Image (cartoon, rainbow, N blue to C red):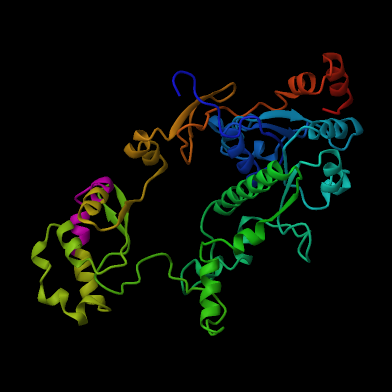
Amino acid sequence: MNGEAAAGPLQGVKVLDLTHYITGPYATKLFADYGADVVKIERPDGGDPARAIAPFFHDKPHLEGSGLFLHLNTNKQSVTLNLKSAAGKQILLDLVKDADILVESFSPRVMPSLGLDYDTLHAVNPGLTYTSISNFGQNGPYRDYKTTEITLYAMGSTMISTGMPDRPPVKLGLTVEHFFAGMISATATMGAFYGAVNDGDGQHVDLSLFEIQVGNQDRSVQGMMMYQYTGGSFVGTGPPRTGGGSSGRNLLPAGVYPVADGYVQFFTLAPHWDRICRLIERPDLIEDPYFTAPENFSNNPEAKAMFDALLIEWCVQHTKLEVMERSQAVGYMCGAINTVEDVFNDPHLAAREFFVEIDHPYAGRLKYPGAQFKMAETPYRAGRAPLLGEHTESVLTQRLGYTKQDVERLRAQGDI
């Protein structure tokens, strides 16, 4: 590349981002971080609702200080538009004329009610890829239902398999589904976009969060395959809940174990008894007649407890990084259960320069998660999230030919 950094792979691609919260902004973040020109359309009265979601910089609520927003909107330009006004709507239509992609995440009734549905925008720009992200898709009996991450997790047959077996199902933490859906949305949109590049005709991409959850490899598909392969005799409930710990089928550790500074997670699918014995520096146990006896090695709680005591005694004398490194060295899968601080200081992530420092006018210089994949010739770019409406004037004057007086008038009228 010699000298200046190479342009991102999506340089020159123009994206209009009408999304909010997590899924849509994560999809368009991927476009922006890899070079696309992403204009984020926000409401003049507060912008993307994610701006009001904690955590906030120094725990002080502020439109420019939401950690979620700062992470999900890097490298974008913010333009405030009132899409309910005639002037605001016309500005969007003008932006659509030379856009390549539009991504929106309103409920299915909103864009048609504004006169901004796919057919209307396709007439303005036949090559436009128009992606709609909604809870249940653009049609069907659930189309207008409201939902949350936990509701989707429940309806998608994933929640039935998580939690303790003697208690009601529970959801695993945080918003994994919405980030996963953002990756799927980005992939689907890129596929449609390159189809339009090839034949000149854009199309409508209809993404349903519910369907993405049902098709997720996180237990859902697994459960459906088991149901079908057993001829429907799988009780129709999904995999049994185990509470996420070791089932204790044999002496080999598979689950969470304490160490000197926290916990590690062991796992194995093979009978690597010799490896775990070498890990805890007890090679004498490899041929031990008690532990290796079939009736003791498998399904014997007393033998399991006895060996766990030896394992834990060794583990608590070592840090989680030491246990992980030694376990990997003998060929037994183990991972440290890291805190956020551990991840920030992880030597592997540091060696691969995963975290990047980005300076923001309000939040200052902070570390952000960087590229999730690396492209040798067309790299990711680090850049900050925009201030609310920061680029309204520049986009209107430079891209659409408005004068500064026009911008002032539109702002006074509440159109931008």
**What is the x, y in percent for residue 404?**
82, 14
Is residue 260 in view from this perspective? yes
Please indicate whether residue 16 sits to the left or right of residue 234 in the image.
right
Residue 260: give x, y in percent of width and height. 25, 49
* Residue 293 relative to residue 235: left or right: left
Residue 70 seen anywhere in this rendered image of the structure: no
Q: Quadrant of the N terminus?
A: top left
Q: Quadrant of residue 148?
A: bottom right
In depth, the one of 249 and 398 nearer the eye is 398
Q: Is residue 189 left or right of residue 364?
A: right
Let me know if residue 97 is in the magenta part: no
User: Where 86 falls versus 156 (above or below)?
Assistant: above
**Residue 266 spot, x, y in % from top left:** 31, 59
Q: Main secondary structure of the magenta part?
A: helix
Is residue 320 on the magenta stretch? Answer: yes
Q: How many marks?
A: 0
Task: Depth check: give the residue in front, 342 or 1.
Answer: 1
Q: Residue at x 32, y 62 (%)?
A: 267
Residue 231 drawn at (x, y percent): 55, 84
Q: Quadrant of the C terminus?
A: top right
Q: Which residue is found at the position 28% from the left and 79% from the top?
A: 299
Q: Tell me the magenta residue range.
A: 310-323
- Whether residue 248 is situated above or below residue 71 in the rendered picture: below
Q: As drawn, which residue projects farthest toward the left?
A: 284
Quadrant hosting residue 216:
bottom right
Identify the residue at the far right of this view. 86
Q: Is residue 69 left or right of residue 281?
A: right
